[in-house]
Image (cartoon, grey):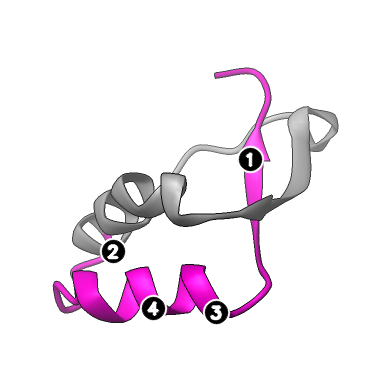
Amino acid sequence: MTTGDIRNLTLRPLSTTDLSACLTLAADREWPHEDTKWAYLLDVEQVCGIVNLAR
């Protein structure tokens, strides 16, 4: 992970359209591949993520 300007980061709600990005993050962190659990979480809960606007 690289450091950068915190002003490029924003918090935003996530939805099921973010499932692919969540699975990519999980794989990068060597978390278990649990696409069904991620899909359920994104569908029934309010989930937020930190997004780098510079990307």
Q: Nearer the viewer, residue 27 or 6?
A: 27
Tell me residue 23's x, y (percent). Answer: 27, 57
* Cα distance between the residues tagged 1 and 2: 15 Å
Element assignment for label 1: strand
Depth check, front residue: 42 or 50: 42
Which residue occupies 21% across, 69% down?
Answer: 35
Please say if 7 is above or below 23: above
What residue is pinned by disc 1?
Answer: 51
> Residue at point 54% right, 19% down?
55
In screen coordinates, is 54 left or right of 30? right
Q: In the rendered image of this protein, does residue 49 appear above or below residue 53?
A: below
Q: Where does the magenta region start and end?
A: 29-55
> Which residue is at the far left?
33
The 10 Å Cα crowd at callout 4, few under 14, some 14 to 19, many 20 or more, is few
Within the image, what quadrant is residue 54 found in? top right
Circles 3 and 1, Cβ within 8 Å, touching? The answer is no
Q: Which mark is residue 40?
A: 4
Percent x, y for residue 20? 29, 47
Q: Disc 4 vs disc 3: Cβ atoms closer than 8 Å?
A: yes
Q: How many angstroms separate mark 4 from mark 3 (CA)?
A: 6 Å
**Which corner quadrant holds the N terminus?**
top left
Drawn side of residue 45 relative to residue 38, left or right: right
Amino acid at pointer 4 = Tyr
Residue wearing tag 2: 26
The amino acid at mark 1 is: Val
Tell me which numbered mark, 1 or 4, is placed earlier along the sequence: 4
- Distance between the Cα atoms at labels 1 and 4? 21 Å
N-terminal of the pair, mark 1 or mark 2, is 2
The residue singled out by tag 3 in the image is 44
